[in-house]
Image (spheres, helix red, strand yellow):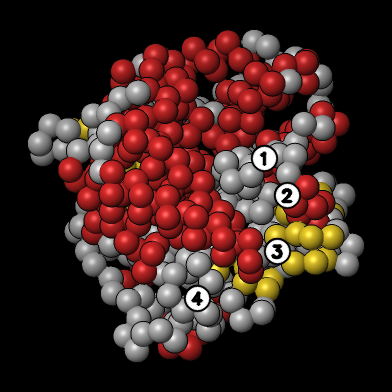
């Protein structure tokens, strides 16, 4: 009944023996045949369909990963697409080499332009965003500055080292990239009135307000807070207020983790210190400016602030999000401030929380209200120890794939056969990560049936 939706073995982009063994072993522990089928389709989707892996001109591994139905590599997505495979890298040299190639490729992308979010495999390829009013270069698909994109590069480097203990990727070029990331994040701590010649502006000729920045491409005004500017959200939508809290929280966690990695490597003591100072400054800015009193939920984190007293109370479906703060390592799951924020995020007080006959969950302005993101449902299950909540999320995910065998970007709250992005690899591998996590932490949940 549940035939595999994976490409035939000869048509798969990348094959890992460790991943294949994990799929077989984990699927055998899942009682619900539909859930087991979804897991077996989704976990390897990035490797099956999006990876180009080959030596570069110097014989070093080079890995390029598209998002799925868009033929470009996002820094954020590419990290998240392979994240669930990291624990398997020590057991599969081919997979470890794929990770080393991605670290090198991401570093090269940042050195090309730290303000770009998405790149082509070769500089000769061009796309329809070349007309954007910003500084485009060959090889860049899109130049929306997203703080979390730089954080994703740090997260992958640290994740690989922690999983494998392999220091070989961290050569002079990668260390230069880490310095450029810190330099960029620190530069964007400045308020909007601190320079007559801003480094980054962005405008697009579009009918979508979320695709461009106002005020000649500068965005809405903001005052120095200690946090760092995030002109665009992880959804690629423009920020309303440019100090986005989830991205800054991710920066705190990633900077501290990278400094700790460099200390273990006994490299770049000055960079370790700079990363730690920067993380402390951003954390202090979050504590001073990002916590607000909500009339129903108490003290919670805002989603965005401007340092001028304005704030936006919402959560978006993409990661980093307020919902994902413990997943990213910023705070503990039991932190009272996070728990207050989580209750707000998963309530009708969050303007992008949607309820319908097909399910309930977080939507966002990128697709619209009422369009629930499976990614957010997966993150909801990853950020709770409440087994009834995990079961509800799984049941919704199983019931809303519309017979495709994969997760989608969104589905309509009252009709899961209406969905966006049939091929969205990040959502698939994140779902796979959830099942692997449950197999470790709550294996008895996988003994249930969810149809």
Question: Dot 3 corresponds to which residue?
Answer: 291
Question: Dot 1 corresponds to which residue?
Answer: 332
At a point 10% along the width and 36% down the height, the residue shown is: 58
Mark 3 and mark 2: span between their CA atoms?
Answer: 11 Å
Are the residues tagged 4 and 3 within 8 Å (C-beta)? Answer: no
Q: Is residue 13 visible?
A: no
**Mark with earlier residue (4, 3):** 4
Question: Dot 4 corresponds to which residue?
Answer: 224
**Mark with earlier residue (2, 1):** 1
**Mark with earlier residue (4, 2):** 4
Q: Where is residue 96, by image quadrant?
A: top left
Question: Dot 2 corresponds to which residue?
Answer: 338
Q: Where is residue 141, by image quadrant?
A: bottom left
At a point 28% along the width and 71% down the height, the residue shown is: 136
Q: How many C-alpha atoms fall within 10 Å of the one at disc 2: few (<14), some, or many (≥20)?
A: many
Q: Nearer the viewer, mark 4 or mark 2?
A: 4
Between 371 and 316, the one nearer to me in the picture: 316
């Amino acid at each position: 009944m549940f035939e595999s939706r994976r490409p035939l073995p000869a048509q798969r982009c990348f094959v890992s023996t460790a991943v294949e063994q994990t799929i077989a072993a984990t699927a055998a522990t899942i009682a619900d045949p539909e859930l087991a089928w979804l897991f077996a389709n989704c976990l390897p989707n990035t490797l099956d369909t999006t990876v180009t892996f080959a030596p570069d001109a110097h014989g070093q591994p080079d890995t390029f990963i598209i998002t799925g139905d868009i033929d470009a590599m996002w820094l954020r997505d590419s990290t998240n697409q392979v994240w669930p495979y990291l624990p398997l890298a020590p057991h599969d040299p081919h997979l470890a080499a794929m990770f080393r190639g991605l670290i090198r490729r991401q570093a090269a992308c940042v050195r090309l332009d730290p303000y770009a979010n998405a790149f082509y495999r070769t500089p000769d390829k061009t796309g329809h965003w070349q007309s954007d009013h910003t500084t485009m270069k060959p090889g860049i698909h899109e130049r929306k500055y997203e703080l979390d994109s730089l954080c994703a590069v740090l997260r992958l480097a640290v994740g690989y080292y922690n999983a494998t203990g392999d220091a070989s990727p961290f050569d002079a070029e990668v260390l230069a990239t880490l310095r450029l990331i810190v330099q960029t994040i620190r530069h964007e701590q400045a308020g909007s009135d601190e320079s007559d010649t801003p480094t980054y502006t962005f405008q697009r000729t579009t009918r979508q307000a979320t695709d461009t920045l106002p005020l000649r491409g500068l965005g809405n005004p903001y005052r120095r807070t200690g946090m760092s500017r995030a002109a665009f959200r992880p959804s690629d939508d423009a920020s309303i207020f440019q100090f986005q809290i989830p991205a800054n929280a991710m920066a705190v966690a990633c900077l501290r983790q990278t400094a700790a990695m460099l200390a273990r490597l006994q490299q770049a003591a000055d960079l370790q210190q700079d990363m730690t100072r920067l993380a402390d400054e951003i954390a202090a800015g979050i504590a001073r400016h990002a916590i607000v009193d909500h009339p129903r939920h108490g003290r919670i984190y805002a989603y965005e602030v401007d340092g001028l007293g304005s704030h936006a109370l919402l959560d978006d479906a993409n990661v980093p999000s307020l919902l994902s703060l413990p997943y990213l390592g910023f705070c503990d799951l039991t932190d009272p401030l996070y728990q207050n924020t989580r209750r707000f995020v998963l309530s009708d007080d969050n303007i992008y929380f949607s309820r319908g006959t097909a399910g309930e969950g977080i939507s966002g302005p990128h697709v619209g209200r009422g369009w629930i993101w499976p990614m957010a449902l997966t993150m909801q299950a990853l950020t709770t120890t409440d087994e009834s909540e995990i079961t509800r999320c799984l049941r919704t995910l199983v019931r809303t794939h519309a017979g495709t065998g994969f997760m989608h970007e969104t589905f309509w709250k009252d009709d899961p056969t209406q969905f966006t992005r049939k091929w969205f690899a990040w959502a698939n591998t994140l779902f796979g990560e959830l099942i692997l996590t449950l197999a470790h932490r709550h294996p008895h949940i996988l003994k249930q049936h969810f149809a």
